[in-house]
Image (cartoon, grey):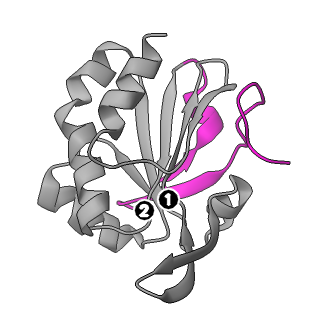
Amino acid sequence: MPISPGIPAPDFTLVDEAGVSHKLSDYLGKPIVLYFYPKDDTPGCTTEACNFRDDYSAYEEAGVVILGVSPDSPKSHAKFKAKYQLPFTLLADEEHKVCEMYGVWGRKKFMGREYDGVFRTTFLIGADGIIKKVFEDVKPADHSAEVLAALKT
């Protein structure tokens, strides 16, 4: 079943950049921006993460939790987070089980090469745990502003 607005967000547990476990359901009662991205410290992913960072105070004011998920290791996440002073949690989905659960893992093409990877996708989850909005084919430069605008609706 595809993940779409109106259904409960599938629960999962992943470790963050420090090796600490996070369970999605632990955040019930707060809106969540759950964003999936392909790889730490690559141009598009860095742009997207830094825009979330730059707008972080607006998310904090709204009581929103930001969780970034990619197949990178906790060690990679720790470097990425430190390099760009990212104030939010990055979760390691090294076996891409959560990516698959959310339907954001699949065949991609880049410069004529095919490979499996993460489709840049964000899920806006309400405080009640229900998915409110799904952003697909995210454009990294505009995405944080797009998510903030959706939070106001």
Relative to 50, does residue 28 appear above or below in the rendering?
Answer: above
- What range is drawn magenta here? 1-29
**Mark 1 burial class by Cα count in 10 Å: few <14, some 14-19, many 20+:** some
- Label 2 element class: loop
Q: Which mark is residue 44?
A: none
Where in the figure is residue 81, as x and y percent of width and height?
23, 57
Q: Compare residues 51 and 78 and report the one nearer the observer.
A: 51
Q: Compare residues 139 and 151 and report the one nearer the observer.
A: 139
Q: Amino acid at mark 1?
A: Val
Mark 2 lies on residue? 19
Residue 63 shows up from this direction: yes
Magenta run includes residue 27: yes
Answer whether labels 2 and 1 touch (C-beta < 8 Å): yes
Where in the figure is residue 138, as x and y percent of width and height?
44, 48
Could you tell me what secondary structure mostly forms the magenta stretch?
loop
User: Which residue is depicted at the point 38% across and 19% down?
Assistant: 149
Mark 1 lies on residue? 15
Q: Give the CA distance from mark 2 to mark 1.
A: 5 Å
